[in-house]
Image (cartoon, rainbow, N blue to C red):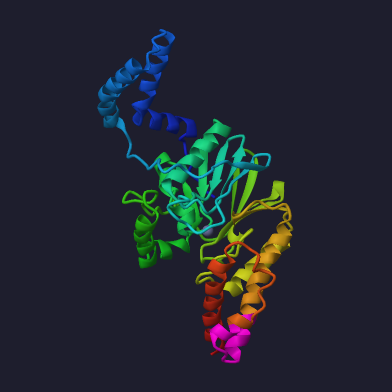
Amino acid sequence: MNFRLGQTPARDWLHSRAAGAPAVAPALLLSRLLSRLKWRRRGWRAVLCMAWLAIAAPLAAQTALPPLPRSPPLPFFKPAEVLPGLWLVQGASALGTAANANFISNAAFIVTPEGVVVVDALGSPALARALVEAIAQITPLPIKHLIVTHYHADHIYGLQVFQDMGVPITAHRAALAYLHSDAARLRLQASREELAPWIDAQTRLVPADHWIDGPQTLTLGGVQMLLQPAGPAHTPEDLTVVLPQWQALIAGDLVFRGRIPFVGQADSGRWIEALNRLLALGVRTLLPGHGPASTDAAADLALTRDYLVHLRHTMAEAARKLEPFEEAYAQADWSRFEHLPLFKAANRINAFNTYLLMEQLAR
Ligand SMILES: [Zn+2]
């Protein structure tokens, strides 16, 4: 495939950011200088720092890029190295709120000898920026590609940070329909209210630079990455990344680990088929779209599949018998899944959507 390579090293970008943003750095320098001069009287240091800020801030503002919210502070953000060179940042098992900064989904990145490939952009520009900063702490190599597993808000609201850095973005073409839909526009509008200040008027929907239709291979620094469309499953545009040399799979939201999946309007029948295809790959390590990494990929793929099968089976039975949803839901056996986080928040609506789907199919 003909990937255009991004040329912006993460560190250079951070430096240009740093040059634009702070009058804080000069103030810090002055403060240190004063300490060295043994000028330790706090009052004087404070006054001089304020004076410096008053002079430096307007000058710095001329070159400053648009500010992103920095407070309230970001939730705990620390990438974990799942395998050498393969990293995961893991969001909370929760619904997106202003309090958790919409840090509810995962991003992965692959550090190769020639640069970094990032998978998913997290749920706000501030989170994406934190991700870029975290990568720069790990390697001086540039970010060369950003791959989107699907266009759900919690995975894409950080995309503009990568676009602004000149990192080429790759996604499956089926996302275009959503991107240009009222649903996407209304979702963003609602998020600007619900997730302020993390999502604001400056947050925008970002299209991919490369829209792919079928499987593609991306090789960087000797690391092979198979971009494998898996949809329509969780979404029409699901894209997974298979890393053969690690026997690893970045699964996007085909797998929610450690919580009940969000089924929404998904085609759960095809989702089950996609999970069966992924099971046949025989990978060992799995990086899900939500929840911790797994070294028993088969078990996690199977659990998500079994949940969907159970939903469809119980709701199909009810639809066939013309049983009302409330009754069917109350009678169903949820014991295998009810201990999972977000069961209360997600299971009922998942069951209801599946009931409607099964009703349609029964007609
Ligand atoms: Zn998600």
Image coords of residue 172 (percent x, y): 50, 59
Residue located at (64% from left, 63% from top) = 340
Vertical order, 143 against 350 (above or below): above
Image coords of residue 36 (percent x, y): 43, 9
| Residue 266 in view in this figure | yes
| Residue 229 in view in this figure | no
Side (left or right) of 107 relative to 47? right
**Toward the viewer: 260 or 360?**
260
Vertical order, 169 against 326 (above or below): above
**Magenta residue check for 94:** no
Q: Give the residue at the far top of this rendering.
A: 37
Asked which quadrant contains residue 16, the reply is top left
Predominant SS of the magenta segment: helix
Vertical order, 49 against 264 (above or below): above
Residue located at (51% from left, 70% from top) = 264
**Toward the viewer: 347 or 203?**
347
Q: Give the residue at the far bottom of this rendering.
A: 321
**Toward the viewer: 129 or 242?**
129
Asked which quadrant contains residue 52, the reply is top left
Image coords of residue 112 (percent x, y): 61, 38
Residue located at (51% from left, 63% from top) = 237
Image coords of residue 206 (percent x, y): 40, 52
Residue extent of the magenta highlight: 314-328
What is the count of numbered marks? 0
**Magenta residue check for 321:** yes
Vertical order, 51 against 356 (above or below): above
